[in-house]
Amino acid sequence: MKTKLLVITTLLLGTMSLQAQRQMVNVPELPSYVTLKCDFHIHTVFSDGNVWPTNRVSEAWRDGLDAIAITDHIEYQPHKQYIPTDHSAAWKIASAMAADNNIILVMGTEITRGMPPGHLNALFITDPDLLATDDFMKVVEAAMAQGAFIHWNHPGWKSQQPDGIPRMYDVHREMIAKGWLHGIEYFNGGEYYPLVMDMCRENKLALIGNSDTHGVISEEYTAPRYSHRPMTLVFAKERTAESLKEALFAGRTAVWYGDNLAAFEEIALPLFRSVITAGAPYKDDGTRIWFELCNSSDIPMKLSGGPEGAPAMLTVPARSMVIVRADRKYLSQPLTYNVDNIITGSDSVLKVEISPAKK
């Protein structure tokens, strides 16, 4: 009997251990900043989600995130027959668990309107009840009075934009002029919107990428289609809510979805350089050289457009190394490549130079 109890106890402890494992996510770093892995668009049973608020915290912890925002709809609570309307409830329920698990929990909400203006998230608010009013601009004004960071959600969502093409409307231009719009979702759920890169660049807005999860996240983002949940990478001065907010307003963000990274070039280039390392040539036959190219991140780097005398295409898998064989002239001049999965504009990708290290 004692032996059976010991076996059962061991199995239970093993199961608990597996459930309590946090994924260690290796993503590129921006020099002098801390990379915070974030999801700012999450729903619970307090609007149209199917998950309890504390489960959102445990999911975030297991997935290696640093910060989340629970953004239940202000105007839409399909479960209110069973769950009373309380716009702060999800945050109140989840906050203690978030603190215990070192997850930054941002108070937020989703402002839900037809297009235009569409749906927008207000983050870092303090009292969502003050946003429960019919006049859209008064809702935004009330959010701004609370210091909100506001981003436009899924601007090419076909339920509101049938052709799937994001467009700025007068209300968005008015918000930008007033300083009331601060970011746009480039990626939402399973969709991405290339034109958002240009819209954000032209209007000095932050690039945002979120899951917009309503169900169990591990069931919505499963292999082989997804290797991880989408997230916004925020480059903050410190790992605090205050620094997170400052970085968002400053636009220091990138979006990681699938094997792709979306960021403006001034951010994308140092991110690439932070994870790709070229070794010194270990072989030189007088005509060609051989050197190692290493990738320390969880994002594979897909290179194309290589120069004459070097590989035309290269993929450096996540946390892996490949051997590059090239003409000896590249001891004194760089190899130039396009990084096809680092997007810098609606029709542009990052261009890089790679040189073997000096001996």
Image: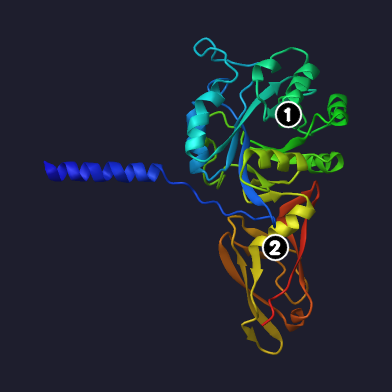
Q: Please state if 17 lies on the left or on the right of 319 as rendered.
A: left
Identify residue for label 1: 147
Question: Which is more toward the observer, 222 or 106?
Answer: 106
Q: Position of residue 272 (x, y in %)?
A: 69, 59
Q: Quadrant of the N terminus?
A: top left
CA neighbours of label 1 inside 10 A, class few (<14), some (14 to 19), many (20+): some
Q: Earlier in the sequence, mark 2 or mark 1?
A: 1
The residue positioned farthest toward the bottom in the image shown? 286
Determine the residue positioned at 48% across, 33% down. Answer: 97
Give the numbered dot on residue 56. Answer: none
Q: Kindly identify which residue carries mark 2.
A: 273
Vertical relation: 124 (above or below) 299 = above
User: Is residue 71 visible in this depiction of the protein?
Assistant: yes
Residue 199 horizontal/vertical position (percent): 83, 39
Amino acid, disc 1: Gly
| Image position, residue 240 (x, y; %) | 62, 42
Disc 2, SS: helix
Occupied quadrant, residue 357: bottom right
Residue 175 falls left or right of residue 354: right
Depicted 80 relative to depicted 240: above or below: above
Residue 50, horizontal then vertical, whole percent: 51, 24
Residue type, mark 2 in image: Arg
Q: How is the image coloured?
A: rainbow
